[in-house]
Image (cartoon, rainbow, N blue to C red):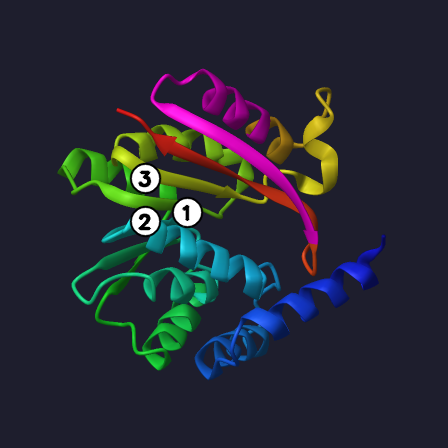
Amino acid sequence: MNQEQWNAMDEYLTSQLLAPDAALDAALDASAAAGLPSINVAPNQGKLLHLLAKLRGARRILEVGTLGGYSTIWLARALPSDGRLISLEVDPDNAAVARANIERAGLSGIVSIVIGAAAQTLAKFVTDGVEPFDMIFLDADKKSYPEYLRLSLQLSRPGTVIVGDNVIRRGRIADLESTDPDVIGLHEFFRLLATNPRLDSTAVQTVGSKGWDGFSMSIVSA
């Protein structure tokens, strides 16, 4: 199998199972026009996040890493009319693109983007006693995943679903001697997933239009 075949398979799955969506397409086009990197989730991955949020019955979602708001739209659409999604983004320019995309999708009423370093924002949420979230999606710098996880657990309740994106890194995660800061961070992230008694976790590798990668999924038990 090669990238061309993976792309063709994702295109087939998307064409069969996902209806055309002007708002999502516009979000991708606007992100590309603004020069944002094409590191958003694939359409079928966005739909998976949407379904996970629906299965959880999420009313409050936290996203760490907004980029152009593509995954934000997928997640926010799973919320009830009185739901809330808070997305954290360090880059003000990315946030501006995302806000326009979210407004175009008609979701500004339930989505808030907070600009700043995610770890600092999460720590402030903890200090301020922000209401726990039902689902948390981690999709930011991988070296910081351990800290994001520790803080996310303080913003969780029993049953909270925590998804970590891009945790396979084209297989580099299996190199226990790696000096790549992202891989080192993910090694610690996996150690925490495995050893924290509050977490019941798994991870799967994926191939597709975004290459060889994967995600982790955890449920908070207490």
Left or right for 93, reference 134: right
Residue toward you, 131 or 90: 131
Is residue 40 in view?
no
What residue is rendered at 35% in x and 71% in y?
99
Q: CA distance from mark 3 to mark 1?
A: 17 Å
Say whether residue 83 is left or right of residue 221. Answer: left
Q: What residue did someone put label 1 on?
A: 137
Looking at the image, which residue sits at the far front?
16
Where residue 180 sits in the image (x, y, percent)? 68, 32
Residue 2 appears left or right of 35:
right
The magenta stretch is 186-207
Q: Quadrant of residue 7?
A: bottom right
Query: What mark, if any, has residue 120 been given in the picture?
Result: 3
- The residue beneath circle 2 is 62
Whether residue 81 is visible: yes
Q: Residue furthest bottom?
A: 22
Percent position of residue 176, x then y: 70, 20
SS class, disc 2: strand
Mark 2 neighbour class, 10 Å CA radius: few under 14, some 14 to 19, many 20 or more: many
Image coordinates of residue 113 in percent, x first then y, are: 31, 60
Examine the structure image and report whether residue 58 is included in the region drawn in magenta: no
- Amino acid carrying mark 1 in the image: Phe
Q: Nearer the viewer, residue 1 or 70?
A: 1
Gap between marks 2 and 1 measured at Cα: 6 Å
Q: Residue sitting at 52 percent across and 79 percent down?
A: 25
The mark that comes first in sequence, 3 or 1, is: 3
User: For the residues marked 3 and 2, what is the alpha-carbon distance in whole angstroms?
Assistant: 15 Å
Residue 108 location, quadrant: bottom left
Q: Are marks 2 and 1 in contact (CB under 8 Å)?
A: yes
